[in-house]
Amino acid sequence: MKINKHELFKTLGWLGGAVLLAGFIRYQMEATLRWPSKTMLIGGGALLAASLAMNFRAVRAFFSRRGTKLGANTLVLVSSVAAILAILNLLGYRYHKRFDLTTEKLYTLSDQTRQIVSSLQKDVRILEFAKEANAQLAGLIPEYRSLSRRVAYERIDPEEHPDLAKQHAIARLGEVVLTTGNRTERLEEFTEQAITNTILKVSRDAVKTVCFVEGHGEKSLNSMEGDGYALVARGLRGENYQVKTINLVTEKTVPGDCTVVVVAGPTAGLFPQEVSLLTSFLDAGGKVLFLLDPFTTPNLDSLLAAWNIQLGNDILIEQNLFSQLTGTGPVVPLIGDYGSHRITERMRAQTLFRQARSVRAASTPKPEVDTVELLKTSEQSWAETELPKGGGRVALDPAKDTKGPVSIGVVASKKVQEKQARLVVIGDSDFATNADIRQVANADLFFNTINWLAEDEDLISVRPKSPTNRRVTLTQAQQTLLFWFALVLLPGAVILTGGYIWWKHR
């Protein structure tokens, strides 16, 4: 029997290719080049090379065909595209850039997070006790680690490391704790705000106290109603402040643990002894925030005069185009003109006030007091001193009213020995209520003010935003109309049009 050498070497070539491929797959699975894989790679390569050498003429003739040349061109083109895509993928992996196209920049770490994490002075470990990583947490951790090398993440299987699970009192799979030295905080939610607040709690040693004065009808820290301050209290605790209420009538002095004192929307005037306590607190280098609503009498004229601040007995009327288009009404100013100050330097969005009174720097300044008018209304506004009875139309009276822009917030500070006393007065308390704290930049204004008063200026920032509710609610009539239009009229029109065209061209 005569053996055809060309067919033999052709068969050996196919066999060599198969052995070579099998050796490569074995090497990839074992992740190390052991002798069986090495033998298969060398043997298969030798058989393939021998087959090509012994059938060189047939190979050359094959590649000389027109169809082969076209196939080779196609192969080169496909290989080039694949190589370009591979290079782009590699560059994207090494120099990755994300684009956040959401209105609120929901997938971009906020200015607050960047500021807190990039300024960390201690190493923070994020420990996730789970068999599989939480998808939401896994998406955020790389962003945090890119801001600071002091942030480390580790996923721990509690069954493999029961000692660590016991050490951190892990009760169930999926719990996450943050540790710094011997301090530990548990992460309750996997959101940016929760992670950043927990990092803040675990990395800061000093805890400052914000004291809210009560006894004059002020906003309640415990109320979840629209006019309550429960969200303010929650937000302050999230930023590592202690929050408590004080009654100055029963105190001989402002409690020593109060870093900042807040008087939020009193409906009745403070007693002279309370004003005296607050004056002494400021004169000793204390920090106070007054939020004073229109047409109330807080009895603070003498205290504010000493700080170069004048409180108007009026209400702001806003007549700009935005107020007219949005239907917010003339007594709802939307402020976007901020004074040059640390509190508002990062703020780009506007702040909304339900009602506000004027708060201005006095015309005869005191050299020892630095004042800045923080919030100003538009040129189309004015400070109305007397609203018409019966809900009539308001109009500017140049003899009584003050033409805009009008200031509704003033920041003041002065040196007291080695300390700096600080005072902020804003002519409205409703902007920080549960109903409005999430409006535009209201939260940033309130919390930045507390940060500045507490001398935590590294916390002054723009905070993470919540997604806007974009759900569409339809009435029953609108649902019926949509059904007939989308499922009956529109498809019917398409079918009839198609039938008519077919009939014309048949």
Image (tube, grey):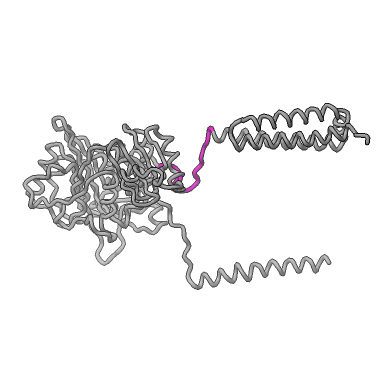
Query: Measuring 46% from the left and 57% from the top, which residue is drawn there?
Result: 470
Residue nearest the observer in this picture, 123 or 172: 172
- Residue 339 visible in image: no
**Residue at horizontal 48 percent and vertical 62 percent from the top:** 472
Q: Position of residue 40 (x, y in %)?
A: 70, 32
Q: In percent of the image, x 66 and y 34: which residue is there? A: 84
Q: Is residue 23 visible?
A: yes
**Residue 106 inside the magenta-drawn segment:** yes
Q: Looking at the magenta stretch, what is its main secondary structure? A: loop
Looking at the image, is 2 positioned above or below residue 386?
above
Q: Position of residue 364 (x, y in %)?
A: 18, 37
Instruction: Name the residue at the right extreme.
Output: 1
Quarter of the rendering containing residue 436: bottom left
Direction from residue 178 to residue 136 in the image, left or right: right
- Residue occupying the far front of the picture: 1
Question: So how many labels did they put on this image?
Answer: 0
Using residue 355 as the reference point, say whether residue 132 is left or right of it.
Answer: right
Q: Quadrant of residue 123 in the image?
A: top left
Q: Classify residue 203 by image quadrant.
A: top left
Q: Where 276 sits versus 39, above or below?
A: below
The spot of residue 297 in percent (x, y) is 16, 54
- From the image, which quarter does the N terminus lie in? top right
Question: Which is more toward the observer, 70 or 431?
Answer: 70
| Residue 7 within the magenta-colored segment of the rendering | no
Magenta residues span 94-109
Residue appearing at x 48%, y 48% in the figure? 102
Q: Position of residue 333 (x, y in %)?
A: 33, 52
Q: Nearer the viewer, residue 114 or 315?
A: 114
- Which quarter shows the C terminus? bottom right
Looking at the image, which is closer to me, 90 or 353?
90
